Amino acid sequence: MKKVFISTAIDYVNGAPHIGHALEKIQADVLARYHRTMGDEVFFLSGTDENSLKNVQSAEKAGISTKELVEENFQKFYAMKKALNLSFDDFIRTTEERHFIGAQKLWQACEKDIYKKKYSGLYCVGCEEFYKKEELTEDGLCPEHQTKPELVEEENYFFKLTKYAEKIKKAIESDELKIIPESRKNEFLSFINSGLQDFCISRSAERAKGWGIDVPGDPSQKIWVWFDALANYITALGFGSKEESKFQEFWQSEATKLHAIGKGVTRFHVIYWPAMLLSAGLKLPTAIFSHGYLTVDGQKMSKSIGNVIDPFSLVEKYGTDAVRYFLLREIPALGDGDFTFEKFEKRYNSDLASGLGNLFARTLAMVEKSGLGQDFEVSPNEYTQKEVETVKKDYRNNFINLNETLAEIWKLISASDKYIEEEKPWTLTNEKEQKEIFSNLLYVLKNIAEMLSPFLPETAEKILFGLNEKNGIYNPKKGEPLFPRIEND
RNA sequence: GCCUGAGUAGCUCAGUGGCAGAGCACUCGUUUCAUAAGCGAGAGUGCGUGAGUUCAAUCCUCACCUCAGGCACCA
């Protein structure tokens, strides 16, 4: 049995989740469910990143404690699990003790590559942030406060990234660390070739306002959030704790280890994270699945434009599987995509209501009306079996391109509708002929449901429940429409 | 500014050195097993711009334009 570790990015809890967050979780969920259906043993992880300084700032703005803010927003992110039917095996918050312990252990494991260095930069007291010259206004002022930033010098810990450049490059080149999509691979190879520099992995506790994880042995410094955040993937598995069996099983083994992340943070996952792991003498992830971003009506989602789409209200209005379907089918798995209600409803009506839902309904209705629907023994003909096998093959080979895989499944739906039209089974009186046609249709529906189960788990279950099959014997019963049509006036 | 990728029907995209494709949307026809769903037909003439290579370019080369991404401490 293959072991598979799949993670989502851990979200930054200074606000509520939007549909872009939902996209990534759903994609990762599909991959996790897919591997389970293939018989693999899966550990699927998600979580929240709670140690960022930004949380401290957001809490101050909101006039509540950082802890309160983080707790409130964690709840909102965690709620996606139920709303979107996500099958996480574990959910880690970086403020949990197990994470603190593990992150500090990881730091210690990297200690030979960590050194202190003075760092100076332009610091805006108002923002409590360092700015680069380019980020300032033309007059060299803070863009937020229009004040002149101070030149601040701080001693921080740095990590010897340079030491691992070659090894990382080789891992990427050889696909030992596979970057999906391939197009990003070259981007990072050229990034490495342009020369890496050591990076800063701590900030002063004062600047962090006491929020975050202490640097082991130096409480005047906090671990930089990225070093801390990346560690979640292994601290959740018990790294650094007394009970490391999951860590051994799913990380330090030949297990597939895949991180699903947004394209904007790919660098941290293909360069910094591997370097940290190499330094600590640990295994590297095997694949980075770097998805694109969502726009709404062609525009970037932003609070000021007011076009942020809330996944919860979408689910409430259209249902979990409809939301999952739209995001998985309309948005290229590895590219950017656009959300509009118009597109959503179009997809819903044409693919789900008129396509899948209608095919299911008409098939069961026909079988029911024919009177053949009891203890129906299904034996599909060769042509049908072959057709299904062809789709299944593509399904397995190209699964990662989730939107294309769905399109492939839909070809079976369309073919079935054509088949029904050609055969017109309701006009037949010959029972044998009818039986053959229904046999083929029920068989296709069952396979569609099985292939669909990672994508639309509830719908797949409903279809299988309706087909009511045991050992090739079906007792179908028609239920409520899977996806009632959306009527707009 | 530099690097990479992309620019094809209303929309989303596939594709090939030799008469330009699919799905959705649209129009017409048709059917009733079905969620006013299905099926068939049709219209759409479009390969970013300019030049070059070639018997022949949407596909190759060059330049340009537009867009997206990357160019280190941003979850």
Image (spheres, coloured by chain):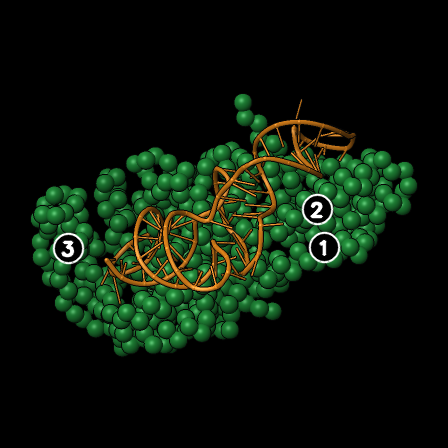
Chain colours: A green, B orange
Which residue corresponds to the image point at 26% horizontal and 39% vertical from the top-left? A62
Residue that label 2 marks: A415
Measured as percent of width and height from the top left, residue A449 is found at 66, 49
**Which SS class for mark 2?**
helix
Measured as percent of width and height from the top left, residue A487 is found at 57, 27
Q: Residues within 10 Å of mark 2 (few under 14, many from 20)?
A: few
Q: Chain of mark 2?
A: A
Q: CA distance from mark 2 to mark 1?
A: 9 Å
Q: Tell whether label 1 touches label 2 (CB within 8 Å).
A: yes
Disc 3 residue type (three-letter): Lys
Taking depth in this image into account, of A482 and B5 the one nearest to the observer is B5
Measured as percent of width and height from the top left, residue A102 is found at 36, 66
Measured as percent of width and height from the top left, residue A196 is found at 27, 70
Q: Chain of mark 1?
A: A
Taking depth in this image into account, of A10 and A360 the one nearest to the observer is A360
Q: Mark 2 and mark 3, same subunit?
A: yes
Which residue corresponds to the image point at 89% horizontal and 46% vertical from the top-left? A432
In the rendered structure, the answer to whether residue B37 lies left or right of residue A269 reads right
Residue that label 3 marks: A133
Residue that label 1 marks: A387
In the rendered structure, the answer to whether residue A52 lies left or right of residue A254 reads left
